[in-house]
Amino acid sequence: MGVEGLPRYRMLYSKDGPARFISHLDLVRTFERVIRRADIPAAFSTGFNPHSIFSFAAPLQVGIGGESEYLDIQLKNEVPPEELYTSIGSVLPEGLCIKEVWQVPDDSPALMSVVEWAEYKVKVGLEEKLNAGALEEYINSFLKQPGIVVRRKAKKGRVKNIDIRPGIYDLGGLIKDNILILQMKLKTGSNGSVRPGEALDAFLGHNSLAVKPVETDIVRTRVFLRLT
């Protein structure tokens, strides 16, 4: 939770290269260290274990890159956004890059609460050749299903079945040098998310497509925020 009345800043950043293998918890710790090293006047929570107040739009799974990720941070006092951009950007580890910083109203809704969907680019190597016409048929067949049920691990080791079809908003693709490139628009946010790996596995399984296991690359290219 943020502290009312303190200035809040939103950062657009990317996560690539070695940074994509940082867990979300380690990413939180990384930004805490970065904020200290950059000598940013961050606001801190109260209680037994105070920590700097910042929040992420939508955590990424380990191994997935992000081209346009959002992070909010509250400060004790106002700082020019360009100063934050320079000071934070100068101490970020390899793979993390600040792209833009701006101030938002301190009474704005929590960042995660305004996330609605995200776009992903998924690349996977195919064992067999596939032409554009066949790919279009596969995509249409996949999307025409009334339900797409996946098994997802829940708390305490339980497994539950989830229908992800309502959360697959759009799916397109192309073939390049026997590499399947899928563009996915998936539900994301505090009210439930569809994981790109789940959608990919469901698509491949539905169409009986064999892939090269070491040639899969997933990048989140955009996170859509509801601003009104």
Image: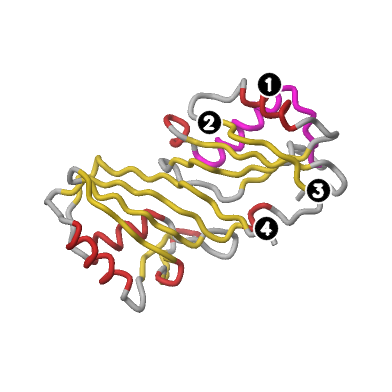
From the top left corner, tell me how far across and down residue 7 is, in percent: 82, 41
8 relative position to 225: left or right: right
CA distance for labels 4 and 2: 25 Å
Report the predominant secondary structure element of the magenta stretch. helix
Q: Is residue 161 visible?
A: no
Instruction: Look at 58% across and 65% down and name the residue there.
Output: 191
Query: Mark 3 belongs to which amino acid?
Result: Asp
Label 3 vs label 4: CA separation?
14 Å
Residue 160 versus residue 217 in the image, above or below: below
Label drawn at residue 127:
none
Q: Which residue is mark 2?
A: 96
Q: Secondary structure at mark 1?
A: helix
Q: Is residue 203 above or below residue 174?
A: below
The C terminus sits in image quarter: bottom right
Highlighted range, magenta? 23-45
Query: What percent of the width, then of the height, locates residue 102?
Result: 71, 39
To which residue does mark 4 refer?
227
Residue 219 at x, y percent in the picture: 41, 44
**Sequence order check, earlier mark of 4 and 1:** 1
Q: Nearer the viewer, mark 3 or mark 4?
A: 4
- Any magenta on residue 37? yes
Q: Which residue position is annotated with label 3?
A: 106
**Distance of label 4 from label 1 (alpha carbons):** 32 Å
